[in-house]
Amino acid sequence: MIDFFNTLIRPIELLVAWIMYGFHQAFTWIGLDPASGAAWALSIIGLVIVMRAAMIPLFVKQINASRKMQLIQPELQKIQKKYKGKNDPESRQAMTQETMGLYRKEGTNPFSSCLPILVQSPFFFGLFRVLNGLEKVATGQNEAIGPITPKVAGQAESATLFGAQLSDTFLRANNTSTYVVTVVLIILMSATTFTTQRQLMTKNMPASALDNPFAKQQKLIMYVMPVVFAVSGINFPIGVLLYWFTTNVWSMVQQFYVIRKMPAPGSAAEKALHERLAKRGKPIPGEAERKAAEEAEAAAAAERSSQRVQPKGKKRAKKKGGSAAVAKKATTTDN
């Protein structure tokens, strides 16, 4: 199993090594010391930029999927209520089919929002393996990782950031600088994770979509994930923590831009967008169509109201006809 994982992750590990090495060469060319922590730290940031830029389409898909999942929660609750208490196979299958039909109709599913995380994971493990293997490559115990030869690995291994080696972890720290740098990065990583999730929940979701089990689950994740990162972060090399913090900052800024420009219908972000457009005297997206639809609906309702005729029953008509005949007979008799 381990050999299979190593074989599977090896291409990603080589890709990570080549991207880092390319950025390191570029920073060295502009004058940075090749053995400096700054050159290697910036190379890790460069890796994040390349990877996240390639993932922009997936990120937009994730935002749209999360938005749609929140908006269809009332419909999902109706389906769940319809089959509540029915545990027979036929009912369970019918509920699953209706749920999947709703997902297909709205063009979303619960797994779409996980795509960026799934795509990032191999790069995360690839970087972890590169940084973790620097010492053995530098001493000749392991073979080179692509362009990371023993000489280059030695430079990366000895490179320090604020006095801490990029390959050090909190658990293997041997100086105060390593403890301080890892703790600061873990706090920053956890804080940016929380801020990104909170931004999505508070600004880009309509109030009606926030009062359902899915939203409560998302809120729970918002508080749990930073804790998970904080606990697991003590095992990660400083370079990996820097990578994760940088990718969180990218996600936060990118999400802020998407929410600001393309907010979910009915959300606080959409209201803020409309207010900004109104102040600038610009048309609000969909406002003309909405007003036209409201006017058309009002006109149709008025037309239906004017054409409505009170129906007459046969008995009522017969009774009215009989009364008219009696009245006519009485008039004739008087004359």
Image: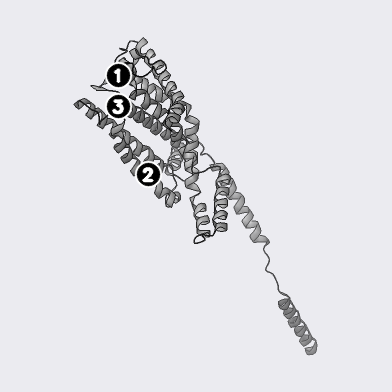
Residue where numbered disc 2 is placed: 221
Query: Badge 1: few (under 14), some or many (20 or more) residues near its Cα, within 10 Å?
Result: many
First-in-chain label (3 vs 1): 1
The numbered dot on residue 238 is: 3
Q: Are marks 2 and 3 in contact (CB under 8 Å)?
A: no
Residue where numbered disc 1 is placed: 157
Residue 172 in percent (x, y) is at 25, 28
Point 60% across, 53% down: residue: 298
Number of numbered discs visible in the structure rendering: 3
Query: Badge 3: few (under 14), some or many (20 or more) residues near its Cα, within 10 Å?
Result: many
Mark 3 vs mark 1: give the one in front: 1
Query: Which three-letter amino acid code belongs to the residue tagged 3?
Result: Ile
Query: Which three-letter amino acid code belongs to the residue tagged 2?
Result: Ile
Point 37% across, 32% down: residue: 248
Residue 246 in percent (x, y) is at 36, 28
Q: Quadrant of residue 118?
A: top left
Point 37% across, 10% down: residue: 29
Q: Please indicate whether residue 216 sits to the left or right of residue 92 in the image.
A: left
Residue nearest the observer in this picture, 239 or 281:
239
